[in-house]
Amino acid sequence: MLSLEFTMPGAVIAAFAVSVGLPVCLLAIARLAPLAGRNAVQFLISVMIAIAAWAAVLLLIPGARPAGAVEIIIGAMVIGSAVLVYLEIWSLLARGYTLALVVTLHQAGGLLTAAELARRYRGGEGLEWIMRHRLAGLEAAGLVQRTDDRLLLTGLGRAAAWGYRVAIALLGLRTTG
């Protein structure tokens, strides 16, 4: 008769432990003055610290040393999965424009016209902030070039637009905004 084994290798336990600690690291990194407002950099540094911490645990703690490549791969998958979950939550909070409208309305006491809500959004920066922020991101990623008052797609931008349209068509999704 075969028996099931429910033990978990030390490398995988270490990966779970590091994954649980990732948000704590992110909270600490987010409070560093030089990184204020740089959400993507904050997240990237936190992930790099988590991976380095996992590697250090694997190297320094005898019970966490992997017995083979499979344990390393499973541990990496655990950390990768945790990073994806945290990234989704982090990006919703960092770029959750719709939720920010709800917060703005709440701060105003809940009685605003749409025009007043638009003016008060993001501490008075208004809804135009979303467009400026998104365009700055596209420029930083090299997808768009600005020439005076005009915007031009780069080669990378055209490739991204093409890939996006193909993905939307293949998946049967509606175009998003």
Image (spheres, rainbow, N blue to C red):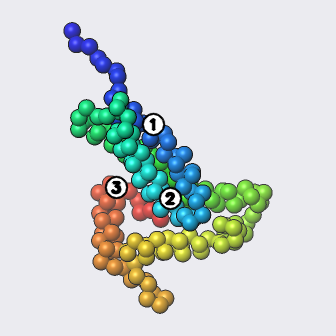
Q: Tell me where residue 51 appears, x and y as whole percent.
A: 39, 48
Say above or below: 176 vs 68. below
Count of numbered labels shown in the rendering: 3
Question: Gap in Å between the C-alphas at discs 2 and 3?
Answer: 34 Å
Say if residue 145 shows up in the picture: yes
Q: Quadrant of residue 174?
A: bottom left
For this rendering, which residue is in front, 7 or 176? 7
> Dot 1 lies on which element?
helix
Which residue appears at 70% of the width and 71% of the height? 124
Between disc 1 and disc 3, the foreground one is 1
For this rendering, which residue is in front, 95 or 86? 86
Say above or below: 58 vs 5. below
Residue lying at the far top of the rendered structure = 1
Three-letter amino acid code of the residue under disc 2: Gln
Circles 1 and 3: CB distance less than 8 Å? no
Residue wearing tag 3 = 172
Residue wearing tag 1 = 17
Circles 2 and 3: CB distance less than 8 Å? no
Task: Work out whether mark 2 precedes mark 3 in sequence or the reverse, and give the earlier one.
Answer: 2
Say if residue 81 shows up in the picture: no
> Dot 2 lies on which element?
helix
Residue wearing tag 2 = 42
Question: Gap in Å between the C-alphas at discs 1 and 2?
Answer: 20 Å
Q: Tell me where residue 77 appears, x and y as whole percent.
A: 33, 42
Q: Is residue 150 left or right of residue 71?
A: right
Three-letter amino acid code of the residue under disc 1: Ala
